Image (cartoon, helix red, strand yellow):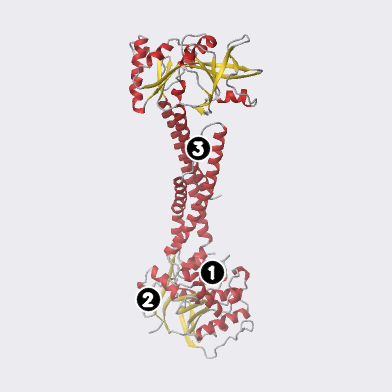
Amino acid sequence: MTILGIVIGVAGVIIIIALGAGAQSLVLGQITKLGANLLSIQPGKSDEKGPPAQLFGIVITTLTRDDADALRAVPHAQAVTAMAMGSSSVTWRSKTIDTNFVGTEASYPQVTSFGMKEGVFFDSQQEQGGANVAVLGYSVWKQLFQDTGINPIGQVVKIRSSTQTEAGGVPLRVIGVVEERGVAFFQDMDDMIFIPLVIGQQQLLGIHYVQSISMKIDSAENVQPSIVDITNILNQRHRIRKATDADFTVRNIADAVSILSTITNALRLFLTAMAAIALIVGGIGILNIMMATVAERTREIGLRKAVGASNSAIRNQFLIEAGTLTFLGGVIGIILGIVISYLLYLLMIYLGYDWAFVISITSVLLAVGVSILTGVVFGLYPAFKASKLNPIDALRYE
Amino acid sequence: MALIEIEKLKKNYVNDEVVTHVLHDINFTIEEGEFVAIMGPSGSGKSTLMHILSFLDRPTSGLYKFEGKDTKDFDDVYLAKLRNERVGFVFQSFNLLARTTVLDNVKLPLIYSKKKDYDKLAEKALESVGLSHRLNYFTNQISGGEKQRVAIARALVNNPAVIFADEPTGNLDSKSGNAVMHILQKLNDRGHTIILVTHETDTANHAERIIRVKDGEIISDEKVTKRTIAEADRDLAK
């Protein structure tokens, strides 16, 4: 019971540090998966950190494919792609699954950096000509083809928008399957089917605008200048004079990362405070048990003094005892902390996040150090009290 | 040079502003190698006197010279060293550590000294009280007489100048008590100074000299004419 506070405190320290490292690896993983230095241009003006306008049901139709073409003029743009997305059902033979479709350009793989499991991504000729081709995301392939053992390349699937009520759909020939990409920014990147932009726009959605333009910038220091370039080009094209009238938003993935790290830091601070409180409570427990121990062993202290123990020898003995007690609590706490961190890791993996299980030596040493220190700090008074006992009074103590 | 020399020794206790005079004007000298019994009824101050002599307590006033040095100047650290190296204690209630082996109990004073060879010295001390066969017993597994002999071994282990025995037979039956007195006499024969505190004349008669204390004053100090020599216990004789 006494060392429970220490156990909780130390386990807390371990978990916090492991959680911090895990969250960090998750965030970093998300960035590299989406591709670093990525900008996203969305229609509608919104607050820098607020949600995009589409979320409020406002449809803004001013962002077009021509805008995307114009943006290729941005000096540091490596790749630009426009996108029109929606939900759809995909049928192959008798199987039908629901998935998201992404109508996009041939440059999409360069923007988001991924490789192909099989086949190829459509080229710009196929895309601009509106060829009836499709590239499957990993889990789409898995659901439709994996069990059958049939090579998906060359097979024809039928796709229809979820809003479409009548039967039928657009037949598309599968030309490639994307490798497994996992979750990026809390979105399953495998549950997707990629089709030429015009197919998505005209045949599935019946629109002429795009929902998003993504741009990859060549290096991190050119991200900010590029945002200025994009804003200038689009302002000119859309004849916008004042920033408040803008009908588009340029988002930087790094901004989103900083929001996330703010959240994880706050969480860390909160957990640290909890651990500190647990350690203080544990320390008071130690103080209590050491006071009881000193009272219980008064005669022993008297005897030890009678056979020659000096005050400092008695004080050290009780300090070491308190330190050992909390050290034990620390060891149990470390084991508990590692086990809980591991369980959290398993949970995160199960939920599909790219979590890392990291127990650093520093965190273990820190936890051990803190636990021993707690014992010494809270054991100091009882140990001092024991050392000052008069041997005669101590020996006579009943 | 006398081992112990005290002059005009006084001890008062102050409790709630009431001053109790426990000892007044005690004077005596004890030479090296003596076997002295301090006798008196309970409340006479004999235990207080022993505590002062054995550095567990300090006198209120008066002179106490130990091995020629005035003890007034000794600090706590030095007193701890003296208790460790120069004196040994045997208590009425044994005061052994529970849940600890006989050997570890005897080793206790050595932990606080700078000596090496703990085990060898402790085994030797236990051999001289006839307990070599109980080394690894726990202190709750042995009899009262054996406990007191462990306590004597503990008092002996640092080869002190004086062994103080405070009613060493008080909690023992006569047979065990006799064995303890036999060991104390044997140690005295080997040159250890023994100071025994008791209220029983029979026990005191094992000493060579009896100092009688009553109401904080010495009432007599004389040689024992018919000294009792404790016979070796047959069980111990092996």
- For disc 1, the chain is B
Distance from label 3 to label 2 (Cα)? 76 Å
Marks 3 and 2 share the same chain: no
Indicate whether B235 appears above or below A203: below
Indicate whether B237 appears above or below B141: below
Q: Locate residue B220, reporting x and y percent.
A: 47, 85
Q: Are marks 1 and 3 in contact (CB under 8 Å)?
A: no
The answer to which of A54 and B10 lies nearer the viewer is: A54
The answer to which of A236 and A309 lies nearer the viewer is: A236
Amino acid under disc 2: Gly
Asked which quadrant contains residue A351, the reply is top right
Q: Locate residue A390, reporting x and y percent.
A: 45, 65
Q: Check disc 3 and report the residue beneath it.
A: A356
Q: Is residue A173 visible?
A: yes
Indicate whether B77 appears above or below B6: above
- For disc 2, the chain is B
Q: Which of the two discs, 1 and 3, sits closer to the camera?
A: 3
In this picture, residue B101 sits left or right of residue A274: right
Which of pointers 2 and 1 lies earlier in the amino acid sequence? 2
| Label 1 crowd (10 A; few <14 / some 14-19 / many >=20) | many
Q: Check disc 1 and report the residue beneath it.
A: B104
Distance from label 1 to label 3 (Cα)? 51 Å
Element type at marker 1? Answer: helix
- For disc 3, the chain is A
The quadrant of the rendering that contains the C terminus of chain A is bottom right
Element type at marker 2? Answer: strand
Q: Check disc 2 and report the residue beneath it.
A: B62
